[in-house]
């Protein structure tokens, strides 16, 4: 879907913001860039939609150079969510969301239906919210609208630049959980920048850790937790209060299913959670509902309850105790 080939961004003073990066971001993947301030993660993100021009190398989207796309067409087909929510204050929520669909000349009925569908999908009743102004919404509600606006014209790619970092911890955690559930429904390619390792571990299918403009490690959350590439990655994990021995972060849905901690039964439609999702995420979701459906090998296989998670973690603790 998105391919970086020896991509470098060098400023006039000779400083390299990004240096010789090679990456492949897969179709439908939730891909997270993380690293300390100034590591190049936001620059890398902004080069995808040409907000920042690259110096050398090439970025491809669907094997077409981004420089070969019409700039307006490129940006209309890439959703973008910022830390600064940037809703137009004088416009209603509906008008804010409708901007790109109107530029793409969608008819009014289609736009109205799309806005209804999207607002409902992020827990905002469409009829209650569509005619409000941004100032009437909380920070968390405004950021939900920001996500919806990015999705409005049904782009294949969504760029998210530290979208939740300005929110209070409760709103932030709720939006993280909502984002996981939403991505299971929409299956977009999401490129997400954060400085929060816990957030990266919760959301990412893969995490790209950067330092001084270069990729240090790019892998799944579990692989990074279990096998940090070097001392920098280990220290970065520890600085984010991430302990690789915390059980709920260490294990995934696949581990629970393989060990039989679920009710195998027919599930209508798609599962709520993929096999790569951390048990920590299941726990957070099960605080708000009694049961979730899960998948393995791309198929919905059954249901997991809070009791399943407790039994599974208790068993893992017992196993670790045997090796102490």
Image (cartoon, grey):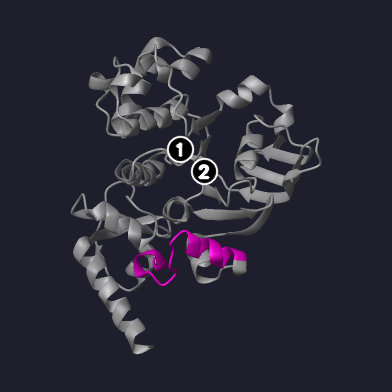
Instruction: Give the quarter of the image for residue 129.
Output: top left
Q: Secondary structure at mark 2?
A: strand
Where does the image place residue 265, in percent across and percent down from the top left? 24, 60
Q: Give the side of residue 82 with respect to residue 301, left or right.
A: right
Where does the image place residue 30, in percent across and percent down from the top left? 50, 47
39 or 319: nearer the viewer: 39
In this rendering, the answer to whether 47 lies above or below 29 is: above
In this rendering, the answer to whether 313 lies above or below 172 is: below
In the drawing, what numbered circle is on residue 221?
none
Q: Is residue 229 visible?
A: no
Q: Nearer the viewer, mark 1 or mark 2?
A: 1
Q: Residue at x 60, y 40 (%)?
A: 42
Q: Is residue 237 magenta?
A: yes
Q: Residue at x 38, y 46 (%)?
A: 180
Q: Residue at x 78, y 37 (%)?
A: 55
Q: Is residue 270 visible?
A: yes
Pointers 1 and 2 in contact (CB under 8 A)?
A: yes
Q: Quadrant of the N terminus?
A: top right
Q: Is residue 130 magenta?
A: no
- The residue that label 2 is drawn on is 192
Where does the image place residue 124, in percent across and percent down from the top left? 27, 29
In this rendering, the answer to whether 4 lies above or below 232 is: above
Where does the image place residue 153, in percent across and percent down from the top left? 47, 24
Q: Quadrant of the C terminus?
A: bottom left
User: How packed is label 1: few (under 14 Cα within 10 Å), some, or many (20 or more)?
Assistant: many
Q: Residue at x 23, y 68 (%)?
A: 310
| Disc 1 to disc 2, C-alpha distance | 8 Å
Q: Secondary structure at mark 1?
A: loop
User: How packed is label 2: few (under 14 Cα within 10 Å), some, or many (20 or more)?
Assistant: many
- The residue that label 1 is drawn on is 163
Going from the N terminus, do you reach mark 1 or mark 2 first? 1
Outermost residue on the front side: it is 13
């Amino acid at each position: 879907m998105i391919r970086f080939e020896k991509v470098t961004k060098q400023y006039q003073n000779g400083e390299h913001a990004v240096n010789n990066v090679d990456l492949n971001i897969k179709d439908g993947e939730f891909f997270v860039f993380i690293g300390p301030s100034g590591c190049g993660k936001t620059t890398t993100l902004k080069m995808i939609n040409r907000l920042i021009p690259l110096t050398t190398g090439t970025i491809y989207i669907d094997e077409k150079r981004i420089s070969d796309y019409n700039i307006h067409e490129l940006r209309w087909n890439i959703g973008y969510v910022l830390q600064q929510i940037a809703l137009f204050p004088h416009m209603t929520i509906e008008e804010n969301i409708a901007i790109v669909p109107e530029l793409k000349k969608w008819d009014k009925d289609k736009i109205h239906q799309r806005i209804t569908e999207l607002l409902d999908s992020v827990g905002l009743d469409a009829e209650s919210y569509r005619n409000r102004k941004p100032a009437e919404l909380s920070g968390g509600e405004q950021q939900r609208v920001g996500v919806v606006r990015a999705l409005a014209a049904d782009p294949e790619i969504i760029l998210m630049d530290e979208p939740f970092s300005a929110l209070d911890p409760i709103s932030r955690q709720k939006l993280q959980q909502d984002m996981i559930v939403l991505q299971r429904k929409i299956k977009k390619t999401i490129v997400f920048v954060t400085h929060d390792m816990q957030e990266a571990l919760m959301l990412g299918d893969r995490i790209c850790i950067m330092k001084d403009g270069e990729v240090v490690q790019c892998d799944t959350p579990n692989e990074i937790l279990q096998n940090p590439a070097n001392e920098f990655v280990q220290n970065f994990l520890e600085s984010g209060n991430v302990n690789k021995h915390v059980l709920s972060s260490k294990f995934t849905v696949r581990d629970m299913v393989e060990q039989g901690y679920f009710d195998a039964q027919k599930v209508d439609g798609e599962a709520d959670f993929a096999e790569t999702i951390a048990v920590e995420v299941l726990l957070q979701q099960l605080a708000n509902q009694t049961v979730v459906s899960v998948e393995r090998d791309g198929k919905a296989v059954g249901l997991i309850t809070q009791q399943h998670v407790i039994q599974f973690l208790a068993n893992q603790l017992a196993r670790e105790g045997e090796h102490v």
